[in-house]
Amino acid sequence: MNLLSVRDLLVRFRTHDGAVFAVNGVSFDLDEGETLGLVGESGCGKSVTNLAVMRLLPSPAGRIEGGEVVFEGQDLLSLDESEMRGLRGKELAMIFQDPMTSLNPVLTVEEQMVETIRAHRRVSKKEAKVRAIELLAMVGIPQPEKRLNNFPHQFSGGMRQRVMIAMALALEPKLLIADEPTTALDVTIQAQVLELLARLAAEHGTAVILITHDLGVVAGMTRRINVMYAGFVVESATTGDLFARPRHPYTVGLLHSMPRLDDEQGQPLIPIEGTPPDLRFAPVGCPFAPRCAWRVDRCWSEMPTLDPLDPLQPGKEIVTTGPGATHRVACWNQPTSDEVAAAHPLRPGFVPAPPPAEAIR
């Protein structure tokens, strides 16, 4: 049985300008101890998807309007707030995107960590403090006994992020969601934080969802990657297979817009043209169609389903998790291997289908 199973998740934000279609039917599974990368541009729904899993959407604007989030056989969307509080921190934990604002500036690190531990375990303040010191030492904070009495502003950005990781791991959760854990950190600290997350996840058998816009980060950190665009998962595969055989035009664009250390010829980066769609409009067809060089007529009217890249053998099932996960792509006109390498269509006479008149806003 999967540790976490998300099915057809729909999230909307109700605003004065109308609904924002933030997450549009996302589905994925996660096994115990597995590390899943969630990548895509800013605003594609990565963080909102996982805030919905944690039931931490801003209220009353953010609403889960459909789907299931099943954790260890229990549908989290059916629980009341007190039941969810009992799971957060203890079974599910999240490292938030900005360590500068995620810690309470008027409370010491000790007060915040002790409160977290005692909210879920029947221990004294002294025992909770001992555990807090142990956690700070585990994440590499020097002189943890002294630093425990400091306020967040007395820590650097990298050390604040380590404190956030320590708090998230305080109760050894089964699932850890890391939302852009290296944002605003220099490359040396980024490497240290990512190494720390990988080591702690391996030692404790914790399943990790790593949210980032950087494919380079997930390359060495995850077993499997979901690529998101405009609230949809458009490609899903094991990490090695995704980098070796990207098949969604958006994934191809992401890879070609990222510098490579092994590029000895100094090939120029190829940006993805255009801008992401306005999520205030209900999705019609493939959301990437306006920016896609491979689009065909049906892309404007039909959203493709997330289907296996390779034909399945009779009786074989689609594998949605683990090291043997099936490579799945949501695209009506997938690039060939040569086109992936060139980053544009190579078929003689092919011209991207123009948008219908009603699609022009």
Image (cartoon, rainbow, N blue to C red):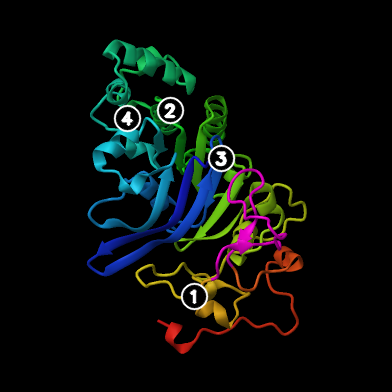
Q: Earlier in the sequence, mark 2 or mark 1?
A: 2
**Rendered location of residue 241, percent (x, y):** 69, 52
Q: Say whether disc 2 or disc 4 marks the residue closer to the N-terminus.
A: 4
Rounded to the nearest whole Å, what is the CA distance between mark 2 and mark 4?
22 Å
Circle 1 packing at 10 Å, graded few (<14), some (14-19), many (20+), is: some
Q: Secondary structure at mark 1?
A: loop
Q: Identify the residue at horizontal 38%, vertical 67% (top origin).
A: 279
The residue pinned by badge 3 equals: 35
Residue type indicated by callout 4: His
Residue drawn 57% across the image and 83% down it: 297
Of labels 3 and 4, the one closer to you: 3
Q: Amino acid type of disc 2? A: Leu
Classify residue 79 by image quadrant: top left
Whole-Å distance between the Cαs marked 2 and 1?
41 Å
Residues marked 2 and 1 touching at CB (< 8 Å): no
Magenta segment, which residues? 304-330
- Disc 2 vs disc 4: which is toward the camera? 2
In space, the residues marked 3 and 2 are separated at their CA atoms by 16 Å
Tag 3 and tag 4, C-beta contact below 8 Å? no
Residue at the spot of label 4 = 153
Q: Which mark is residue 169?
A: 2
Q: Nearer the viewer, residue 104 or 269?
A: 104
Most common SS among magenta residues: loop
The residues bearing labels 4 and 1 have C-alpha atoms spaced at a distance of: 47 Å
Q: Quadrant of the C terminus?
A: bottom left
- The numbered mark at residue 285 is 1
Q: Is residue 110 visible?
A: yes
